[in-house]
Structures are given as structure tokens and as C-alpha cells.
Amino acid sequence: MGVDLAACRIEHFPDGELHVVVLSELRGADVYLIQPTGPPTHENLFELLLLADACHRAGVARTTAVVPYLGYARQRAIADHTDVYVVFVPPNVWQIPTGPLNVADRVALTNLWSGQYTTYALLSLRSVGDQPGVSTARYLTAWRSLPNGVFIDAKKFGTYRVSDGDYVRAFPVGNVTQIPPFPFPSSASSFTVYLPYIGFNYLGQLTSPNNEGEAIPLSRGSIFYATANGVPLAQPADVLETPPGNSTSSMSNVIHLDWVTGRAHVFRQEVQ
């Protein structure tokens, strides 16, 4: 890109917490964050969020971050000439019946009861080599979760309304947007459900029902899952933002996806 790398320091406190300090003068600059989110996924993703926060505090004009899993979904959609979806575990996952599932999928579904507001996977409805008109849905990744203490704002799992703005509009769900139900919780499952999703088409654009962008507000706090002896129970999770309301304050990080390009940017909300 013809520019120098900015200096930063990333340290671990004795208790394992991360500390990020930006050492370069960045006020008024356009900053690009390049951070892998491979193993250890949780730590690398949290580093990315802390770097975005540090840049905001340093007074940068704009922060653009590579969000690999969203970028990977977009690239796979282009490369495979098909639609690829980032699907999310819904808050009512504990209400999905386990009866139609085999033993392995039943265990997997039970484990996803503790994935409300945090867990996602990539899924394609077609594979290379499929015959025209025939689709073979399969998951491109395992189910993955956001770092502890970070979760997707609960309002994104509410009722989808096209008229709502990007930041408050719930994720689309297939029974509203005419997208077929997805196999769940694995590619091998013959059981299908409608899941919240973000989709990319073969051009790399979002498959938005009304040609709109998409936003993923990331909240800070805790999610409390009902368990008994360490085993998840079929109950809704309790969500606690710390401090309260941080998902709509200047403290929150938001991943925004442009409808036309499908590209993702991470930025901080500003209080109006």
C-alpha cells in the first residue's frame, strides 16, 4: 500500500487480560487494521476489537478492519458462483425439537443452547459440481463463538422489518425473506430450520431483501445460560450489558457491511 505500519503494543496482564496501546500518532488518519482471526480465534478477534477501540481513542478519522469470516463468506460466494450465508444461532434455539435428529446432531444442538447471541457458522446452499437445479447445502466452517464478554446486540434477533435502519433492523430470516430453511445443526442433518442470516451472492453483494446494508452491533457484558451440573438447559439466556446500554452508546463497536460491495468495516458508534 506504500505506507508504513503504525506502532502498537499488545500485552497480557497476569490474569490473561489483553492490553493494547497505540504508539504512533494517528489523529486524523485513515487506519486499516490487518488482524488474523485464526486460532486462537477468541483472542485474535478480541485483539481486533481492542485495536479498533484504541484507534478511536487516538482520534483517527476512520478505521477499516478486515473481518476474515465475513470476507471469507463473500469470497466463497464469488469463487463458487453461489449464495453463501453467515447463519446465527437464534435465541429460541432451545425450542427447536430434538426428536428428528440423530444422536450426534442432538448433542450438537444441545451444545448450541449456550450459543445464543454469540455463535455463527458459514453455510453454502450449493457446492461446486452440483447439477443445475440441484443443491447440496453444507457448512463451510464449524460453529464458532465470539470472545467471552462480547455478544451481538439482542435487537438484531428481533422481528425483521425492511423499513428499519441498518443498526436496529433485525437479521433477516428465511420464512420472511423467502430463503429456504437451512440444515441444522450440521450438513448431514435432514432436519431444516429458518435461521437468522447474512447472505452474499455470486457478485459478492449482500442478498438483502430490499437492497440495504447490514450492521452487527457488538455489545459488552455477560450472557447467563441456564445449566444443571454444567449441562445446558432448554431455557432462554439472560443478557446483561456492562455498562447498561453500551450497544447504543459511543462505546460499542459496529461491523457494517456495504450492500453493493459486501465489504465489512468496523467502527465506533457516535452519540448524536
Image (tube, rainbow, N blue to C red):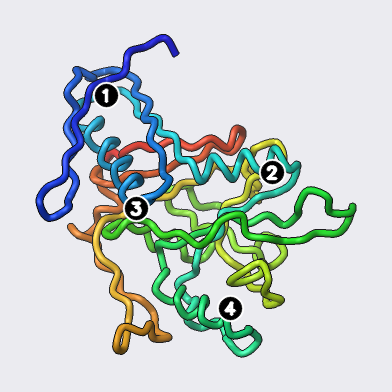
Residue contact between numbered discs 1 and 3, judged by CB atoms under 8 Å: no
Q: Which residue is mark 2?
A: 201
The label nearer to you, 1 versus 4, is 4
Residue contact between numbered discs 2 and 3, judged by CB atoms under 8 Å: no
Q: Which residue is mark 3?
A: 42
Q: Residue at x 25, y 38 (%)?
A: 53
Residue contact between numbered discs 4 and 3, judged by CB atoms under 8 Å: no
The label nearer to you, 2 versus 4, is 4
Q: Is residue 264 left or right of residue 148?
A: right
What's under tag 4, amino acid-wise?
Answer: Asp
Q: Position of residue 153 (x, y in %)?
A: 37, 58
What's under tag 3, amino acid-wise?
Answer: His
Rendered position, 41 above or below 238: above
Q: Quadrant of the N terminus?
A: top left
Q: Label 2's element?
A: loop
User: What is the spatial separation of the Cα atoms under label 1 and label 3, in whole angstroms?
Assistant: 25 Å
Q: Which residue is mark 1?
A: 60
Whether residue 74 appears in this view of the structure is yes
Disc nearer the start of the sequence (4/3): 3
User: What is the spatial separation of the Cα atoms under label 1 and label 4, in whole angstroms?
Assistant: 46 Å
Residues 79 and 238: in front is: 79
Q: Residue at x 58, y 85 (%)?
A: 103
Rendered position, 29 above or below 271: above
